[in-house]
Image (spheres, helix red, strand yellow):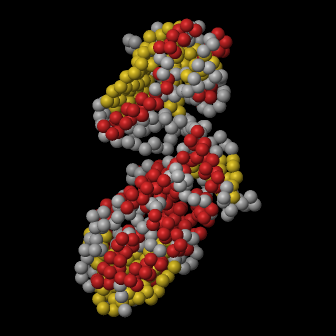
Amino acid sequence: MNSKIFTGKIKHRRYWPVDHDLSYPVYLYAFDLDEFSGLNRRYPLFGYNKLAVTSIHDRDYLQPGNLPIKEKLSELLRRHQIKQSVSNIIMITSARYFNYVFNPVSFYYCYTDDHALAAIIAEVNNTYGERHPYVLKAGTPGAGKWIATFQTPKVFHVSPFNKVEGIYRFYFSDPKDQLEIKIELFNNNKKIMTAEFKGAGVPMTAVNHLKTIMEYPFAPHLSIPRIYAHAFKLFFKKKLSFNDKPIPQSPMTMKKQTPGIFETLCQKLVFKALRKITIGGFKIKMPNQEIISFGHPEDSHPVIMKIEDYNFFPRVILDGEIGFGEAYMHSEWDTPDLLKLLKILIQNRDHFSDGNLLLSFFTRIKEKTAHDGRINSIKNTPENIRAHYDLSNAFYELFLDNQMMYSCGIFEQPDDSLEKSQEQKMMRILTQADIRETHHILEIGCGWGGFAVFAAQKTGCHVTGITVSKAQYDRACQRIIDEGLGDRVTIKLQDYRHITGKFDRIVSIEMIEAVGPQFFSTYFKRGQALLKPGGRMLFQSIIIEDKRYKNYCKERDWIQKHIFPGGHLPCLKILKETISEHTDFHISNVHHMGADYAVTLSHWRDRFLSNKENIVRLGFDEIFFRKWIYYFSICEAGFTVGGIDDIQVSLELV
C-alpha cells in the first residue's frame, strides 16, 4: 500500500500589516487514489463513499457530483493541457471524521508512468463553502528538500484579512517518510504571510489508523473554531482591516452546492413569502438547476431569478429589504430582467412582510440606530453628502446629461433625449417661478452648477448657488469661469442654515431629501426668511406615498444605507402640514412627474451600463457596479408601479 498518514504541525505566520502567528498539531492523509477500494474493504474504520469513523467522499472534492476524484482530476488536467500521461495520483487531505470535514486545502501530486511529476493541484476551500483548484504546472525544479516550487496569481478569496490580489509561492517535498509543504503569499512584492505543514509519515495500516485517531480525537473538529478564534484576535485585538467577500471572478471557482441547516430553514421562509405573490409570474432557478414557480400561473413571460449562492436566503431573512439588495450586490442572485423582477415584488409588497420579524429584530434595531446616527445636523450633513456626491466628478459625467443634472427630467415627447428632458424641466422651473432678468436667485443644493448656468444664460438673472459637496463646488466654480458668468453666478460651499441675505426667488431641486424630518420646518422657515416680500420658492422633491410614510420612518432601507446616508423621503401630506404650520407660504401649484423619473432613470441606467469599462478604470469594483444598477432599477420600478413620486411645488408668500 502506498497510502500514508502524516502527523505533524501546521504553522501560520503573518508578517504584514500586523505580526501574528499560530501553530497546532494535525494529521493528514496521503491517499493513493487507486487504493480507495482496497482501503474500504480492509480497514473497518475507513469508508469510501460511505459512513465510517474516517471516510472519503468523491462529492467533497473538486467539481460537484459523485464522479470519482481521479476522473475529475483527469478532466481538470485535460482542460489545463497537461499532455503527459498521469498514471498515479497521491492526494494529501483531511478525511471526513464522524461525517464532518473541513479541508482548508488538499493537494494532488500527479505522476507519470516513470514517476515524474506532471503537475500538482492545490484545491483551496473557504468557510463560505466555495472551492478553487490551482493547477500548478511548469514549476521550477526543486532544490534541497523541495522536489518542485510553483508561483501563481491568487484569484480566490480565503481570509477576510487578505485581499484577493497577490501571488502565491508553493514549495513541495516528496511525500515519502517526511512531508513538508509551504505556501507564501506576496502582495506588491511584500511578504504577507506563510503557511507551512511539516510531518512524519507512517504506512496506512489498521493499527496506525486507530492509533492516530486515538491520539488526535478532536483535531478535525478544531479547524473552524481555530479560524474564528484567531480572526477574533486579528480584528478586535490587532485591529486588522476586514475585507468583504468579493464576487468570485475565476470560472474555476466552484460555489457552494448544498445548503446548510440554517440556509434550508431560511429558504423555506423565503419560499413561504413568495407563495403569496398574486401579480405576475415568478420562477426561481436554484444552484442545483431546480426551478420553482411562484405567482400567477397564467403569466406567459414569468421573470426568472437565479440563486447563485445559498447565503441569499439567510441574508434576506435576517436583513429583509436591505439584505435582498445586498445579496444582489454580492452576486448571490441574478436575473435577466432586474427591472421586471423588482416591479413584481413592489406590486406584491402588501402580501408579505419584510423578512422574518423575529429573526431580523436585532438587525432592524441596528440599522435604525445607524440611520438615526446620521441625522442631517450641521455637523453630519457634509459627511452624508460627501459619501454620495464626492465619489468622483468623472464618475457622474459617465451617465448624466451634459448639464450634469442629477434629478428628474421632463419628457414631453417619447423620443426626447435626456439632455432635452433636463432643459424642459429647467424651463418649467423658470416659467413656474417667474424668474426674470432683474431677479437674484438662491439655489439650495446647486449640484455641479447646471441650473445656475442655465438660468443665468436664459434670463440674465443673478444666481447664488450653495452646496456642501466639495467636489460639486469645485466643478461648479470651474464651470462658471468656463462659461464667463463670474459676474452673474456665485457658488458657495455653505449649509442652507448659514446663508444670509435676501433673494427674489429660491429654487431647490431634489435637495429636501437630504434635509431629514427633524429639519423640514427649519428648511421652509429659512426659505421664507431669505425671500424678499412677494418672493417665490419652488422646490422639487421625491416623495413616498402618504399611507406608507409612517412605516417608512420606522426603519432604514437599502437606499438609505448604501446610496444616500441620512436620506429621507417626505410625503406630500407632511410637506403640506409643515408648510402650513410653520410658514406663511401658500402652495400655488403641485406638479407630479413620477412617470418622467422612470424614463430619466432608464437613460441613466443605459448610459451607466454602456460605460462599465470606464467605471472600472476609475477604480470601482463589481460590487459597486451592481449596487448602482440595483439603485437605478429599484427606483425606476418604484416610479413605474407607484409607491414613490416626484413633484415640483410652487410656493408664494401670502
Residue lying at 62% horizontally and 25% vertically, measured from the top left: 58
Q: Quadrant of residue 507?
A: bottom left
- The N terminus, quarter of image: top right
- Residue 587 lies, in percent from the top left, at 43, 86
- Image height check: is 390 above or below 151? below
Using residue 529 as the reference point, say whether residue 411 is left or right of it: right
Q: Outermost residue toward the front?
A: 358
Residue lying at 47% horizontally and 77% vertically, measured from the top left: 572
Using residue 292 as the reference point, say whether residue 115 is left or right of it: left
Q: Nearer the viewer, residue 630 or 585?
A: 585
- The C terminus, quarter of image: bottom left
Q: How many marks?
A: 0
Residue lying at 48% horizontally and 28% vertically, measured from the top left: 104
Residue lying at 57% horizontally and 23% vertically, measured from the top left: 98
- Image height check: is 97 above or below 159? above
Q: Is residue 465 visible?
A: yes
- Residue 543 lies, in percent from the top left, at 48, 73
Using residue 87 as the reference point, say whether residue 512 is left or right of it: left
- Image height check: is 298 above or below 251? below
Q: Quadrant of residue 599?
A: bottom right
- Residue 50 lies, in percent from the top left, at 65, 22
